[in-house]
């Protein structure tokens, strides 16, 4: 069993997929109490640390986790994307000070795991004209790693959802002679909402207000604002009516024969709506969790707004598994070195 530590663990989408691929978590750090409670409830044996990562990264991590430098197999997680301040001197890790990524990099430098997995939104590549991600890559390389990255779509990896993530994998330079980095191939079948909605268990959720519900009743499955009376659509959209672009997220009702659009942290946002195909309401927490490929047994803690947020912020479990399985195979090659 290979060991892993996960940072910014959230409600466990990434951690669960990594576990399914054959890894044992020796520590998961999560600041949000509800998300940490979710982890503890579903995996009582996990070492869940509900604390600010800044309070942990400054410690003697070898002593704290009971491992020696270089022993950890995998460091995983994804820090929220933040701009860096540039002194123009390429200071390496100092360029990231004051950001959450800085603490991820500290863990990497202090523990020197064999490999690391860093996931983030696709937009990180272009954030601050690409300078943010370039600085991250520089820091990874200075910490002693070779880097490969790809943008992967969860729909290609078992999730009934279009969700692109930037996946960065690092391999410690002293191990390059014995193994390599690989990314998962696309699965043959790409699931759609019909596969997961028709038998979904009931669970907490919210409803539309009466006015919004009446308007959404006019929208056919797979349709949006252009598919109803323009007068009604214009009244609903107000200032959005004059915006440029297709505005295809407004009054959007999904169909059973397509994947979900990216699951969000709120059940109803005017420009990014995802109405249920058959019923006039947003998806429930459990329906969103199915889109994220959480098992039905995975329970979420906190109020319904917190549960929606936890699910929306998660990495799809099936995508996590496919990535982690390739990392597992890479580590297997090291056994005979």
Image (tube, rainbow, N blue to C red):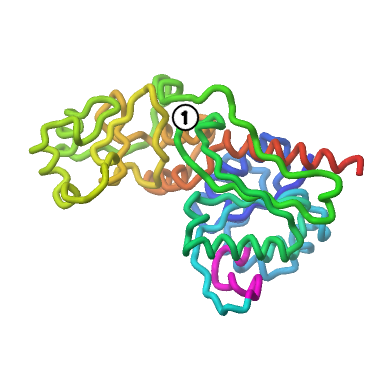
Report the number of numbered marks: 1
Query: Between 76 and 305, which is closer to the camera in this rendering?
Result: 76
The quarter of the displayed image where residue 277 is located: top left
Q: Which residue corresponds to mark 1?
A: 160
The C terminus: image quadrant: top right
Mark 1 surroundings within 10 Å by alpha-carbon count, few (fewer than 14), some (14 through 19), many (20 or more): many
Residue 1 lies in the magenta stretch: no
Identify the residue at the far right of this view.
336
Where residue 105 appears, x then y in whole percent? 66, 63
In the rendered image, the quadrant that contains the N terminus is: top right
Residue 266 position within the rendered picture, expressed as x and y whole percent measured from the top left: 35, 46
Residue that appears at 59% across and 45% down: 150
User: Does the rendering let one see residue 141?
Assistant: yes
- Determine the image quadrant of residue 15: top right
Q: Which residues are magenta?
A: 90-103
The location of residue 130, given as percent across then percent down, is: 52, 61
At x 14%, y 39%, the residue is 233
Q: SS class of the residue under badge 1?
A: loop
Does residue 92 show up magenta in the picture?
A: yes
Residue occupying the point 63% across, 43% down:
44
Most foreground residue, 105 or 34 = 105
**Residue 4 position in % (x across, y down):** 72, 48
| Magenta span: chief secondary structure | helix
User: Position of 283 compared to 91: left or right?
Assistant: left
* Residue 26 visible: no
Q: Is residue 222 left or right of residue 126?
A: left
Would you say 45 lies left or right of 95 here? right
């Amino acid at each position: 069993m290979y060991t892993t530590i996960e940072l910014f663990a959230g409600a466990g989408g990434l951690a669960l997929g990594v576990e399914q691929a054959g890894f044992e978590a020796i520590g998961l750090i999560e600041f949000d109490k509800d998300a940490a409670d979710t982890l503890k409830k579903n995996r009582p044996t996990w070492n869940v640390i509900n604390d600010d990562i800044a309070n942990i990264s400054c410690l003697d991590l070898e002593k704290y986790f009971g491992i020696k430098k270089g022993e950890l197999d995998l460091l995983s997680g994804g820090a929220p994307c933040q701009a860096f301040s540039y002194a123009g001197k390429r200071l390496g890790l100092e360029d990231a000070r004051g950001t959450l990524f800085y603490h991820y990099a500290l863990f990497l430098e202090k523990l020197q795991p064999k490999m690391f997995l860093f996931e983030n939104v696709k937009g990180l590549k272009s954030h601050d004209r690409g300078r943010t991600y370039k600085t991250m890559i520089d820091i990874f390389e200075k910490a002693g790693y070779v880097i490969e990255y790809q943008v992967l779509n969860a729909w290609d990896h078992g999730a009934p959802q279009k969700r692109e993530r930037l996946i960065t994998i690092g391999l410690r330079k002293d191990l390059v002679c014995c193994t390599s980095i690989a990314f998962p191939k696309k699965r043959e079948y790409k699931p759609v909402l019909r596969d997961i909605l028709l038998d979904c268990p009931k669970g907490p959720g919210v409803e539309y207000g009466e006015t919004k519900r009446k308007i959404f009743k006019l929208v056919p499955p797979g349709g949006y604002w252009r598919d109803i009376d323009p007068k009604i659509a214009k009244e609903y959209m107000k200032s959005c009516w004059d915006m440029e672009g297709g505005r295809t997220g407004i009054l959007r009702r999904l169909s059973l024969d397509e994947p979900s659009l990216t699951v969000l942290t709120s059940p109803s946002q005017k420009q990014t709506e995802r109405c249920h195909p058959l019923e006039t309401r947003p998806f429930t927490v459990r329906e969103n969790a199915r889109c994220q490929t959480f098992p039905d047994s995975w329970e979420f803690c906190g109020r319904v707004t917190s549960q929606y947020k936890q699910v929306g912020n998660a990495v799809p479990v099936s995508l996590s598994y496919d990535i982690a399985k390739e990392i597992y195979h890479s580590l297997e090659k090291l056994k005979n070195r």
